[in-house]
Amino acid sequence: MPFQDRPEEPELPPSPCQHMQFLDCNSEVGRVIFECYHCLQGIISEYTGDPLMGEYKGRPSVIFTKVKCPNCEQTAIRLQAREVLSITAIPSPWQQ
């Protein structure tokens, strides 16, 4: 069926997304700039190390490191890193 002849489908509502930008990925200490998933506070964080491996339902699984938002105290993001070295609140680069 050609595209023009298809019945219109209702547009889905927007779903929340999380902005993030990774810096220094090839360095021993990496940095990531992101927004808190809950309050959209801008955050820059330094991290290091390969992620820890665990087990989930008998299969290997990455253990995520939770980063707490300094503004709302909730989990802002979960990183695949062994250790988070710093968490600093900054103005969000995506909120203009």
Image: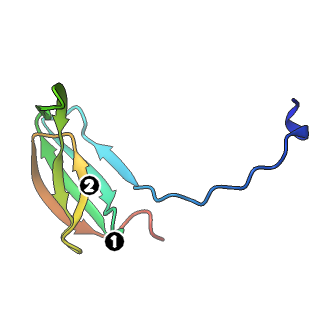
The single residue placed furthest to the right in the displayed view is 5
- What residue is drawn where x is 44% and y is 63%? 94
Tell me the amino acid under the disc marked 1. Cys
Q: Quadrant of the N terminus?
A: top right
Helix or strand or loop: what does disc 2 sit on? strand
Q: Residue at x 26, y 54 (%)?
A: 77
Q: How is the image coloured?
A: rainbow
Quarter of the view holding residue 29: top left
Q: Residue 84: x, y in percent?
A: 11, 50
Which badge, 1 or 2, comes first in the chain's sequence?
1
Q: Is 51 on the left-hand or right-hand side of 10?
A: left
What's under tag 2, amino acid-wise?
Answer: Ile
State the SS at label 1: loop
Q: Number of marks in the image?
A: 2
What mark, if any, has residue 77 been given in the picture? 2
The residue tagged 1 is: 39
Q: Nearer the viewer, residue 73 or 55?
A: 55
